[in-house]
Image (spheres, helix red, strand yellow):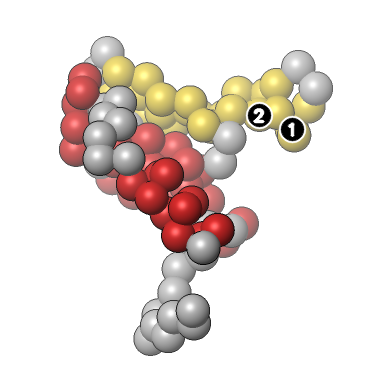
Amino acid sequence: MATQLESCLIASGNTYNPSLVVLRQKGYEVWLEKGDKGDDESLWCAKKGDQSFLAYTGPELLGLVALWEHLGRNWNQQKPDIYSELIERLND
């Protein structure tokens, strides 16, 4: 099934900085913590107030913040199970 789009944004190296720009503009403190095994395990971090976020990429970090801002403490919603629905469709 081919999808035609006029514009397509793909999470890649060129989306790291724009993601961090958005987080700063939203008032988050952002930083990078080096992992034990070097840059390959570094964590991108953001904090605002008492809430902290950790991710492996800038776009993932922004996604976690968006999840929290939209759902708050009830972020872990598993119903409806859209993930399984999409996996089933892929395997059909």
For the point 61% across and 57% down, the residue is 13
Given residues 1 and 61, the one toward you in this image is: 1
> Is 51 or 2 nearer to us in this picture?
2
Is 45 on the left-hand or right-hand side of 32?
left
**Is residue 21 in view?**
no
Per the image, label 2 sits on a secondary structure element best described as strand
Rendering coords of residue 26 (x, y %): 25, 41
Q: Which residue is nearer to you in this view: 80 or 57?
A: 80
Q: Is residue 77 visible?
A: yes
The location of residue 24, given as percent across then percent down, is 34, 41
Circle 2 sits on which residue?
Answer: 42
Query: What residue is disc 1 on?
Result: 39
Residue type at mark 2 is Ser
Q: What element carries label 1?
A: strand
State left or right for residue 27 relative to residue 6. Answer: left
Question: Is 35 in front, or is 64?
Answer: 64
Q: Residues within 10 Å of mark 2 (few under 14, many from 20)?
A: some
Query: Callout 1 environment at 10 Å: few (<14), some (14 to 19), or many (20+)?
Result: few
